[in-house]
Amino acid sequence: MSPVSVRFKKLRPQASAPVYGSASAAGADLRACLDEETVIAPGETRFIGTGLAVALPEGYVGLIFGRSGLACKRGLAPANKVGVLDSDYRGEIMVALHNHGAQPQTVAPDERIAQLVIVPCLTACFTESDVLDDTARGAGGFGSTGRL
């Protein structure tokens, strides 16, 4: 599959470009664009800017995921679980980092704080209907398909 061209703009000189950590990485690392370290208290959410804006092609969406090491080792993860960058958004990419841990956590300038995954996005045409087709699952909700 060919790479999709995505233009980005540095909104501050110290901002770092998104970079893939390996040739097969799905997400490009986003870094904190800070003038100094910032502390996130337990249970607190802080908006951390990346200093970047992107121009995603129409038909694509940018999904901002947490970094597994940051979440598992330090309890820091996006407050909204997955951020959504629409293709028409041109503002700064911000990461709402939440401290799920019991200790204050320090975020350093240029620290990797999240990863950006760019995927195709379909737009649906929603049609109201009085009847929906039957499935084996039916209306079974949370936990209805078993534990395994």
Image (cartoon, rainbow, N blue to C red):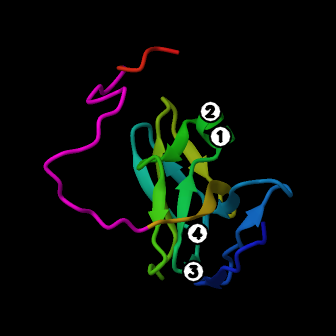
Mark 2 residue type: Cys
Q: Amino acid at mark 3?
A: Pro
Q: Amino acid at mark 1?
A: Ser
First in sequence, mark 2 or 3: give its number. 3
Assess whether mark 1 and mark 3 are in contact (beta carbons under 8 angstroms): no
Q: Which stretch is magenta?
A: 123-143
Find out whether the residues at labels 1 and 4 contact each other: C-beta distance under 8 Å.
no
Marks 3 and 1 sit apart, C-alpha to C-alpha, by 27 Å
Decide: is 2 above or below 109.
below
Q: Is residue 94 magenta?
A: no
First in residue order: circle 1 vs circle 4: 4
Check disc 2 and report its element: helix, strand or loop.
helix
Mark 4 element type: loop
Give the mark nearest the N terminus, 4 or 2: 4
Residue matched to label 1: 68
Q: What is the chief secondary structure element of the magenta stretch?
A: loop
Gap between marks 1 and 4 measured at Cα = 18 Å
Label 1 and label 2: CA atoms lie apart by 6 Å
